[in-house]
Structure formats: structure tokens, C-alpha cells
Image: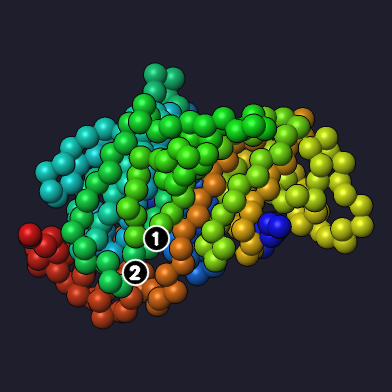
Amino acid sequence: MSNVRRVSNLLKSQPTIEGAGVHLKRAFGNIQAPMLDPFLLLDDFHSSRPDDYVRGFPWHPHRGIETITYMLNGRVEHGDSMGNRGVISAGDIQWMTAGSGIVHQEMPQGQQDGLMWGFQLWANLPRSNKMMPPRYRDVGSQDIPEVTTDAGARVKIICGELDGVCGPVRDIVIEPEYLDITVPPNSRFRRAVKSGDTVFAYIMEGAAAFDDTREPHGTERKGSGKTEAEAGGLLGSESLVLFGQGDEVVVTTEDRSARFLLISGRPIGEPVAWYGPIVMNTQEELRIAFEEYRNGTFIKKG
């Protein structure tokens, strides 16, 4: 018998400005990161106003983490200190492992009507992998499989496996799962997850309840004795749901569909020393990283 995960925390994304003046919504960051280990940050950049994003993210360093960029609309041109150049377009994903160090830039561009929408997730690396060689996984939308479940939910599998179908991003240190899920109205979606993993959902569109205490037709089970959120209260866009422990996630919709990211990963459980784009285990490691960046020895060869 499965143990359904309950909602342990709810977060609402907050406006912030990053890079050279990019207006975005931050679902979680430094303050909330300890409860989302191994994940550090999730940004939702969504605007039809070019002035909100065209200044982009000029050259900056990363060390000790992975950055995962997923585009829904528009595109991002990127380049780095290893000589890589490319474009992430609508439906594409880039999984960048900064490892020992990389310097790169990301410059967003909207589609013809100006709309630009995407997400960037930061995942931590354990001490034993923080100085691994940098690498990229650029995956085009055509290479991301989509599965339709018996209940009618559409699931894009970026990382992980569903019904025997594997996502294209594999062999990641924290063994994550990254799914883009759309559940139709008046439906229930169930997903087995690894016991002990950190699991969260970020709602992009629509509304849903994120446990099994509400029936698909909208009748709440009686006598649950829970708060509205705990008892299946519907949550809307730009909300993040952090799940407690268990081995299954249940999502229920009523008269509207819901589209959300479902992301999970194995906690690292190590000290975190974090300043700006660099995340290490100790303050001394941070000091060394920034000193190397200043004196030109940040990028490791070979």
C-alpha cells in the first residue's frame, strides 16, 4: 500500500531582479534552500515586455552546482569560457554542470509577440563532485518524450522514467526526476516517487489539489480535520508545493486543467557555503573560488 505524500510547505514565487536587470519570479532561493536539499533555487522568468529581460545575464562564473534551463517560449542565446555557443528555444532544455568552474552568459530573447517564458533550476553538487569537469547537456524539444497516462495526463519526461519511457537527461549525480505534467479537468494523477527524496511541484497554469483528500469531481472527503491546503485546497499558478515524506504524489483537478513541474532528487545532507553564483561546502572554499576568479585561475584545464 502506498504512502501518499502530504503538503509540508507552500511557497508563492516572489518578484526579484537578477543579472543586468532581468525581472523574474523566484519560487525559492537561499533562505528556503535548506528544506529543498539538493535544490538551491528556482526562477520563473515570464514576461511579454522585452525591457523585463533583454539585458539578460552577462558573463558570470559558476562553481559547485548544476543549472537547468527549460524554455517554454522565446529563446536564450548562451556562450561560455570553453568556447561553446548555442541557443535554447521553446521546448528545449539545457542541463549545465558547472563543476570546477565555468564562466558563461545567457541572453534571453522573446518570440515574435515579445513573450519569453522559461525556468532556471539550480541543483547542488556533493563535495565529491564539486570540482568535476564542467559539461553541457543541450536537449531539443523533439528529443523530449511525452507520455499520456491512463487518466489522460500528458507528461514530458526530461529526466526520469515513466511507463518504461526514459527522459534524455541521464547519469546525473543527485539522481533527479524532472517532469512537465498537464492534468486535464476533473482528473487524478498519481506518481510513485522514491522514499527519502526531496519532491516539489511548481504550478505553471491552472489549479489543482496536491494530495488525495479531494475527489476529482470536487467533493472533499469529510472528517479529515485538516487545513484547507492540507485537505486538498486548490492551488494556482506561481505556487510551489513541497511534499513531506512518502512514496507517492497525488494531484487532483476540478473544472480546470493544471500544468506543473514535478521535480525530485536525492538530498545531499552536507554544509552549504553560498555566495552569488558559487556554492561550496566551506567559507574557505568560497574565498579560494573568488580569489581564483579575480586572478584568472578559476577555469581548470584538463
Query: Percent position (x, y) of residue 180?
Result: 51, 38
Tell how many labels: 2
Q: Left or right: 143 with respect to 230?
A: left
Q: Earlier in the sequence, mark 1 or mark 2?
A: 2
Query: What colour scheme governs how the chains and residues are painted in the rendered image of this protein?
Result: rainbow
Q: Residue at x 57, y 40 (%)?
A: 260
Q: Amino acid at mark 1?
A: Ile
Most distant residue in the top direction: 112
Query: Percent position (x, y) of residue 296?
Result: 9, 63
Q: Is residue 176 above or below residue 23?
A: below
Circle 1: is it few (<14), some (14-19), or many (20+) Cα within 10 Å? some
Q: Is residue 90 visible?
A: yes
Q: Which residue is mark 1?
A: 174
For label 1, the SS is loop
The answer to whether mark 1 and mark 2 are in CB contact below 8 A is yes
The answer to which quarter of the image holds residue 258 is top right
Q: Is residue 285 above or below residue 149?
A: below
Q: For the residues marked 1 and 2, what is the alpha-carbon distance in whole angstroms?
A: 8 Å
Q: Left or right: 272 with respect to 209?
A: left
Most distant residue in the right direction: 223
Query: Percent position (x, y) of residue 286?
Result: 27, 73
Query: Percent position (x, y) of residue 127?
Result: 30, 72
Q: Residue at x 88, y 49 (%)?
A: 221
Q: Amino acid at mark 2?
A: Pro
Q: Residue at x 59, y 51 (%)?
A: 192
Q: Which residue is mark 2?
A: 126
Camera-nearest residue between 40 and 97: 97
Q: Left or right: 83 with respect to 69?
A: left
Circle 2: is it few (<14), some (14-19), or many (20+) Cα within 10 Å? many
Query: Quadrant of the image for the C terminus?
Result: bottom left
For label 2, the SS is loop
